């Protein structure tokens, strides 16, 4: 549930139909921030270890940075975005039904 209603930032209106859905917005934000988190963690790893850096250690830092930043950004979008308010999820964020 979005924190916007609890904080009083929401007027409770349904968004326009051409807006992005909550799941799509979360997916795009997490994808963008995972690349940035991987690059930032890779740089921090190289600064921390210097000449003692190894490829597995560098990849481990980059993957942890990507996962952490993508989860954090998706959580913040879910909590603070107007697209993720309950009335907008109910109106526009319907799961796609795949044929069996």
Image (tube, grey):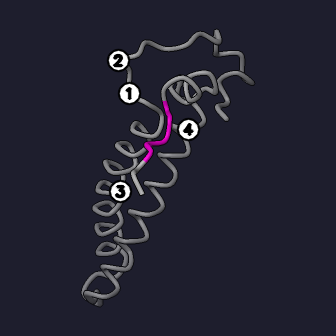
Q: Which is more N-terminal, label 1 or label 3?
A: 1
Q: Which residue is mark 4?
A: 78
Quarter of the image holding residue 46? bottom left
Q: How many labels, in total?
A: 4
Q: Image point 35% across, 17% down: which residue?
A: 18
Q: Image point 29% across, 66% down: which residue?
A: 43
What secondary structure is marked by label 4?
helix
Report crowding for label 1: few under 14, some 14 to 19, many 20 or more residues within 10 A (C-alpha). some
Residue furthest front in the image: 100
- Of 91 and 67, which appears nearest the observer? 91
Q: Reply above or below: 37 against 84.
A: below
- Label 1 to label 4, Cα distance in Å? 13 Å
What secondary structure is marked by label 3?
helix
Quarter of the image holding residue 55? bottom left
Q: Which is more N-terminal, label 4 or label 2?
A: 2
Q: Is residue 56 left or right of residue 97?
A: left
Which dot marks residue 34?
Answer: 3
Q: Nearer the viewer, mark 3 or mark 1?
A: 1
Quarter of the image holding residue 75? top right
In the rendered structure, does residue 94 fall within the stretch colored magenta?
yes
Q: Which residue is mark 2?
A: 18
Q: Image point 41% across, 65% down: which residue?
A: 65
Q: Which residue is mark 1?
A: 20
Q: Image point 43% across, 30% down: which residue?
A: 21
Q: Is residue 7 left or right of residue 29?
A: right
Q: Nearer the viewer, mark 2 or mark 4?
A: 2
Q: In the rendered structure, which segment of residues is drawn in magenta?
A: 93-97
In the rendered structure, does residue 100 fall within the stretch colored magenta?
no
Residue 9 x, y percent position in the rendering: 64, 16
Q: Are marks 2 and 4 in contact (CB under 8 Å)?
A: no
Report crowding for label 3: few under 14, some 14 to 19, many 20 or more residues within 10 A (C-alpha). many
């Amino acid at each position: 549930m979005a924190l916007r209603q609890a904080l009083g930032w929401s007027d409770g209106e349904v968004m326009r139909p051409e807006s992005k859905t909550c799941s799509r917005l979360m997916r795009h934000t997490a994808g963008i921030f995972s690349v940035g988190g991987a690059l930032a963690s890779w740089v921090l790893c190289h600064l921390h270890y210097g000449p003692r850096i190894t490829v597995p250690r560098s990849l481990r830092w980059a993957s942890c940075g990507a996962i952490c930043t993508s989860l954090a950004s998706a959580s913040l979008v879910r909590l603070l975005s107007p697209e993720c308010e309950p009335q907008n999820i109910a109106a526009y964020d319907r799961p796609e039904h795949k044929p069996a």
